[in-house]
Amino acid sequence: MNAPPTTSQDYARIARAITWLQAQAAAQPDLASAALHAGLSAAHFQRLFTRWAGVSPKRFLQFLTIEDAKRRLAETRNTLDLAADIGLSGSGRLHDLFVALEAMSPGEARLGGAGLDIRHGIHDTCFGPALIAATTRGVCALHFVDDHDAGLQQLQRDWPQARLLHNPASTATIAQQIFAPLADTPQQSLAVLVKGTNFQIQVWRALLALPAGAVTTYGDLALALDKPAAARAVGTAIGANPIAYLIPCHRVIRATGALTGYRWGSARKSAMLGWEAARSEQSHAPQP
């Protein structure tokens, strides 16, 4: 399904509305109040939000409740149990994933990207502006950025010895593939290149077993990795994930069902989870 054709300015309004709707959920605010908070007329806000989410603001908010999160947690536990049984990184993966993860060797990682050319650019996405960086071996960074300079500085810290090449024309193709795939085009594989500890890479691979619309907890992810006492370490690895969205750390929530905690902001995490839940519901709906 095509990604919503929204701009970063549109997303900023939607994110503000989502934050406000969550804070006011107990009072069940009406459409006019949410639109007013977003700085739009009720009709404009309804059109913008529905085009972006695929569902009404009222229906979207239902995907972000504690009760709905707990329901999806229960469903996802079965997914993780089966994924653990067949091997999270084996050839029999549970889902037809389009993300192939390649890990740098420890020796390569110590070189800090020496000898690598990294092309990068900032692109509008349905979740706000994103810095995308890629080598010939795959995407090595995807950061949602509110400050473009800060995003580039983070890329330089992560890859201090690499040659960074501002080339948004090349990364625009990747942004299109990730956030606006054509509905009638077969899903293509997309490689990502990461560097991290063995445990971090285990966690990032495990995240790829989570389909869109699913959620899990730090503890359940640790159990799936056969490390039940490592929930805190799982959280640290998730916080270090350098490739947002593609390695879906936004799908990890607290055991209580709370959606808090995300490197790129809680509002963005809620937006992603609600957006994915809406599309998952639509994909499973009976066809007329």
Image (tube, rainbow, N blue to C red):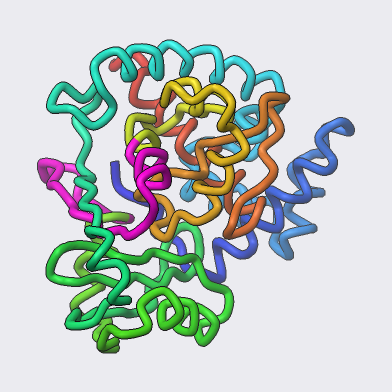
Q: Nearer the viewer, residue 85 or 257?
A: 85
Q: Is residue 287 left or right of residue 156?
A: left
Q: Position of residue 8 (x, y in %)?
A: 51, 69
Q: Is residue 264 left or right of residue 89?
A: right
Toward which corner of the image does residue 30 lie, by quadrant?
top right
Residue positioned 31% across, 19% down in the render: 83
Residue found at the very far right of the displayed protein: 27
Q: Is residue 181 above or below residue 81?
A: below
Residue positioned 21% across, 52% down in the render: 102
Q: Position of residue 198 (x, y in %)?
A: 35, 46
Residue positioned 38% across, 30% down in the render: 210
Q: Nearer the viewer, residue 87 or 71?
A: 87
Q: Nearer the viewer, residue 85 or 260?
A: 85
Question: Magenta stretch: residue 151 in it?
Answer: no
Instruction: Please provide the residue range marked out in magenta.
Output: 179-205
Q: Position of residue 233 (x, y in %)?
A: 56, 41
Q: Is residue 84 left or right of residue 104?
A: right
Toward which corner of the image does residue 173 lie, by quadrant?
bottom left
Toward which corner of the image does residue 138 lie, by quadrant?
bottom left
Q: Count up the numbered dots.
A: 0
Q: Nearer the viewer, residue 263 or 222?
A: 222
Residue positioned 81% across, 49% down in the render: 33
Question: Magenta stretch: residue 186 in it?
Answer: yes
Q: Position of residue 250 (x, y in %)?
A: 52, 44
**Image quadrant containing the C terminus:** top left
Q: Is residue 28 above or below residue 138?
A: above
**Image quadrant containing the N terminus:** top left
